[in-house]
Image (cartoon, helix red, strand yellow):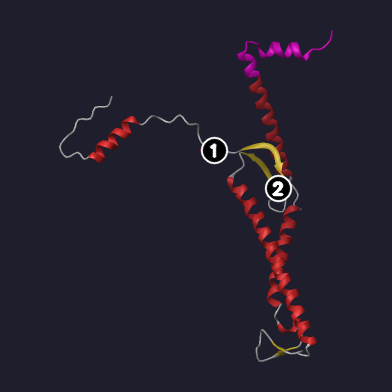
Amino acid sequence: MLVIRLEPGLTLRFIRTVHHAASKKPSNKPPSTKDESTRRQAKPPRLTGSILRPSLFNVPQPRLSPQPVKTSMMIRNRTRARENRREKQLLHMQYIRDMREEFKFWERLGVNERPSRKNEAGKGKGVEETGYIEIHNEQLARYNASYELDKLRSAMVVPPEMIKRVELAKKNKARAIQKKAEGRKTAKGIPPAIESATTERVGP
């Protein structure tokens, strides 16, 4: 039982605060997924012995475990940017189609001249001459240039130095696994030399 001795000047709110802090039990809840993810990311990434193949969103690079957040966010942002680019591309293409249809409508009405977008005092006779769709064509050219960069990224070749580095990491990983297995056998009381002599020799 908690006994609180009242002193002059103590307020009721202060007494309740002290009582709540003293009666609060420690939490036995398991760590949340966010805490576990933070703990994993705190570990230095290690080479897994494989390669992250080139794609539209990343260049070839050694695969790490855990994968750095920077790499994951880069792939995610490039994927989202490509999707947004595609949506805007379709929108500009629709604007161009609509403008051409509108000019055809003017031609059917016998109105063949329209003010130019670049020079309002001038006259343009066709949709290609007026400059109304020029801004959309310029934007489409930028999108196509970005698509070409994506293709170049996906067509990159894995450098020989990276292959050697990954193969060395694969050997080190296999050696570490074997060492760990031998340590477990030793802990069980089976010397590694005896175990290898009894398992490797087959037949007379």
| Image quadrant containing the C terminus | top right
Q: Is residue 118 above or below residue 186?
A: below
What residue is shown at x 69% (from left), y 53% (from top)?
57
Q: Nearer the viewer, mark 1 or mark 2?
A: 1
Q: Quadrant of residue 191?
A: top right
Proximity of marks 1 and 2: CB atoms separated by less than 8 Å: no
Q: Is residue 187 magenta?
A: yes
Residue 62 lies in what quarter of the image? top right
Question: Identity of the amino acid at label 1?
Answer: Thr
Q: In terms of sequence position, does the residue under pointer 1 or pointer 2 come before the other?
A: 1
Relative to the observer, which residue lies in front, 187 or 12? 12
- Which residue is at a point 72% across and 61% down the rendered structure image? 147
- Picture disc at residue 53: none
Vertical relation: 103 (above or below) 187: below
Is residue 19 highlighted in magenta?
A: no
Place of residue 176 in the rendered image (x, y in percent of width and height, measured from the top left): 65, 27
Horizontal placement of 158 versus 77: left or right? right
Measure how far apart labels 1 and 2 are at the Cα level.
30 Å
Residue 65 picture location, percent across and down: 62, 38
Tag 2 residue: 60
Residue occupying image coordinates x 48% and y 31%? 29
Q: Name the disc covering residue 33, or none.
A: 1
| Residue sitting at the far right | 204
For label 1, count other residues whose C-alpha is less than 10 Å away and answer few (under 14), some (14-19) or many (20+).
Answer: few
Magenta stretch, residue numbers: 182-204
**In percent of the image, x 25 and y 39: which residue is there?**
14
